[in-house]
Image (spheres, rainbow, N blue to C red):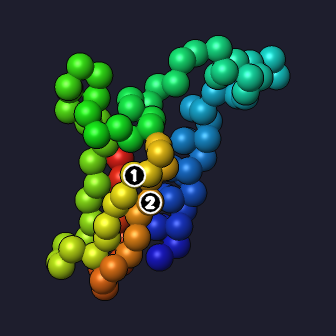
């Protein structure tokens, strides 16, 4: 057991040694505001631009359908209607 602890400690120390130091002059978070929105179809429209497929998709834990999705005026609502524990909506 002592060997395992020593080995894990050495591995963690090696990982720390290779990590770059944080820069004091890192750009401010406002730098992110200079680009366009990277989300496709942020309003959840039924069809993308020029009839293209929607970039959003939903999936849930295996089993019976347990979630419904509804879009109203650009707002996505996800409602749990059965027993499955999770649902994700991604792009």
What's the distance in space between the residues labelled 2 and 1, CA to CA?
A: 6 Å
Mark linked to residue 80? none
User: At numbered mark 1, what does the secondary structure look like: helix, strand or loop?
Assistant: strand
27 is higher (above) or lower (below) than 78: above
Q: Position of residue 34 (x, y in %)?
A: 65, 14
Q: Position of residue 83 (x, y in %)?
A: 31, 85
Q: Which residue is mark 2?
A: 77
In contact (CB < 8 Å): disc 2 and disc 1:
yes
Along the line of sight, the residue nearer the viewer: 42 or 2: 42
Q: Position of residue 72 (x, y in %)?
A: 44, 51
Q: Which residue is mark 1?
A: 71
Q: Position of residue 70 (x, y in %)?
A: 36, 58
Query: Is 79 situated left or right of 59 in this image?
Result: right
Query: Is 47 situated left or right of 15 in this image?
Result: left
Q: Earlier in the sequence, mark 2 or mark 1?
A: 1
72 is higher (above) or lower (below) than 45: below
Instruction: Determine the image quadrant of residue 52.
Output: top left
Q: Residue at x 26, y 71 (%)?
A: 61
User: Farthest residue in the bottom direction?
Assistant: 83
User: Farthest residue in the top direction?
Assistant: 34
User: At numbered mark 2, what does the secondary structure look like: helix, strand or loop?
Assistant: strand
Q: Is residue 85 visible?
A: yes
Along the line of sight, the residue nearer the viewer: 1 or 33: 33
């Amino acid at each position: 057991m002592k060997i395992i602890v020593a080995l894990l400690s050495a591995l963690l120390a090696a990982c720390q040694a290779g990590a770059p130091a944080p820069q004091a002059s890192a750009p401010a978070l406002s730098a992110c505001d200079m680009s366009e929105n990277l989300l496709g179809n942020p309003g959840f429209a039924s069809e993308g631009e020029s009839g293209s497929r929607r970039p959003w998709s939903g999936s849930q834990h295996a089993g019976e359908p347990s979630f419904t999705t509804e879009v109203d005026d650009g707002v996505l609502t996800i409602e749990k209607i059965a027993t499955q524990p999770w649902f994700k909506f991604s792009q």
